Image (tube, grey):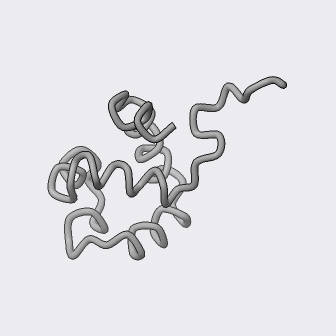
Amino acid sequence: MQQSKDPLHGKTLEMVLNGLVAHYGWPELGERIRINCFISEPSIKSSLKFLRKTEWARKKVEDLYVSTPSIYSAID
């Protein structure tokens, strides 16, 4: 069987976001990715709603996840 080359294969947006929040916390995540849903009263639910509608923000979240080896490899 051949494995996918996509580093996010099998990962949901919720898994990615939860991993980032667990690793960085909301304050640092809001500093790294300057979007309101991470800064003002952040929650997983509101962030997922925004990220699912906003491609550029979702891309930034996915890129940060992939570029953070300590969480990317720990969740595999």
Counting every numbered tag in the picture gives 0
Indicate the quadrant where residue 27 lies.
bottom left
Indicate the quadrant where residue 10 lies.
top right
Is 17 drawn above or below residue 8 in the view shown? Answer: below
Q: Is residue 32 left or right of residue 76?
A: left
Is 50 drawn above or below residue 55 in the view shown? Answer: below
Q: Residue at x 46, y 50 (%)?
A: 16
Q: Residue at x 43, y 35 (%)?
A: 72
Indicate the quadrant where residue 68 lies.
top left
| Image location of residue 2, percent across then percent down | 80, 23
Q: Residue at x 41, y 55 (%)?
A: 17
Q: Is residue 22 left or right of residue 15?
A: left
Q: As rendered, which of 29 and 23 lies closer to the eye?
A: 23
| Image location of residue 30, percent across then percent down | 22, 55
| Image location of residue 38, percent across then percent down | 27, 63
Quarter containing the N terminus = top right
- Identify the residue at the far right of this view: 1
